[in-house]
Image (cartoon, rainbow, N blue to C red):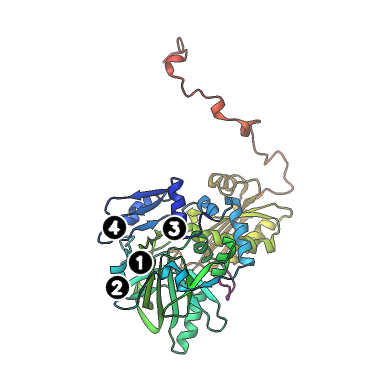
Amino acid sequence: MKAKTFRTWIEHLQSTGRLAVIDKKVSLQYEVAAIAKKLDGKQAAYFTQVEDYTIPVVSGICSTREDFAEALETDPYGVIPKFTEAVAAPIPYRLVDNKQAPVKENIIREDIDLMKLFPIPVHHDKDSGNYITAGLFIVRDPATRKQNACIHRLQISGKDKLGVLLLPRHTFHLYKQAEEVGRPLECAIAIGVEPATLLASQASTPFGVDELEIAGALRGEPLEVVRCETVDIDVPAFAEIVLEGKILPNVREPEGPFGEFPKYYGPRSDKEVVQITAVTHRNHPIFYTIVPAGYEHLLLGGLPREASLFQTIRQTVPTVKAVYMSPGGTCRYHAIVSIKKRNEGEAKNAIFAALSNSFDIKHVVVVDEEVDIFNMEEVEWAIATRFQADKDLVVVHGAQGSKLDPSNNDGVGSKMGLDCTVPLNSDPMRYLRIQIPGYDQVNLEDYINTRASLQSIHLEGRGV
């Protein structure tokens, strides 16, 4: 397995020319983020010399759909089916002892100072400070013993304190239950896990489903986990770093602003606080950071959303062929849907189903199955030639949306769907796409003489 651990995946990237090693000394203040952003979608960035630290930093380990497909041992078209199957049939993880868990090679319980221990970057000019952006935030439901894993932005708020943005989802629900009886909620933050576990943490599932078990299904084998030192949480045994702690009840401190996935800043406000109780890490750990709003960030959020979206639409339109959360729509706001239309009105049903799947989705475009939804030029062509606003436009006002979308009113705004499918009763020639016979079979290397020069071409008498 190429991506059995974080380190084996990095080694694989290096062996295939997809890891850029930066040996020049770099600053945590913007420089790490700037270089990683320059390489976004091309190569992962591995920084060997970060100012004031001996620990390297890596970013961009999965910044294309092809990267995730390879890590999951499938092709780009197989990512969503494989993810869907994993969500439907999770594999329980396997608990190992400390001796079998590299993340326990170093255990720190006293005098914890996160910024002295780890090279945690500042990404954007208005960010309120150093942020952990690639940590799996793991909590446990005390009633069911099931865990929940996700990724939250984590601001360094003190030597051993983190400010955390908890959106109204599963972790927030468990925290509020604990806070109502005056208890802290135990948590652990795992930094440096392999792509399957990283992707599993973003699954849209019913409350009570354990994302680390989904990771096992994606891997095809149980994920090895180890119990934390100071909290009742199981964490990936081969993670690079684990921070143990508790979300404090009835404590709020300023957090933000922070550059988020829409490429705008999430505002400063009072947020929940994590008190760190212990740190464990591998020998010679590698610190992993995700540059916000880069392809890695967007795809991590987008691919699991596509799996959930596909399932939702299929309940209403069984002939849905594929869905795509486009990077231009931040992999959250824009959904492109391909269907095999058999009845008029199905495209509009697909629009309503898509809008109901997630409050983040703002614009939906539905096209026929022959349109390549992963090619935005094709999608724009379908809008240009198969859409009329007076009959194909669906608009919903006053709907809940993303509070990180600056164009709406505190998370409430309008949503839109575009039916770009061909009418079933249309004249066959009216929407017949032009084509050149034999085009797909042409191999340019068979025709172009790359060694030819203008001197060998007869241009006499043809003018200048």
| Between marks 1 and 4 in the image, the one whose residue lies nearer the viewer | 4
Task: Tell me the kind of residue under disc 1.
Answer: Tyr
Dot 4 falls on a residue whose secondary structure is loop
Question: Mark 1 vs mark 3: which is more N-terminal?
Answer: 3
Q: CA distance from mark 1 to mark 3?
A: 22 Å
Relative height, residue 161 to residue 52 (above, below):
below
Residue 208 on the magenta span: yes
Q: Label 3 belongs to which residue?
A: 7
Task: Tell me the kind of residue under disc 4.
Answer: Val
| Between marks 2 and 1 in the image, the one whose residue lies nearer the viewer | 2
* Number of marks in picture: 4
Question: Mark 3 vs mark 4: which is more N-terminal?
Answer: 3
Q: Quadrant of residue 282?
A: bottom left
Q: Quadrant of residue 381?
A: top right
Task: Tell me the kind of residue under disc 2.
Answer: Asp
| Extreme residue in the bottom direction | 181
The residue stretch that appears in magenta: 205-210
- Graded by Cα atoms within 10 Å as few (under 14), some (14 to 19) or many (20 or more), the crowding at tag 1 reads many
Q: CA distance from mark 3 to mark 2?
A: 25 Å
> Main SS of the magenta segment?
loop
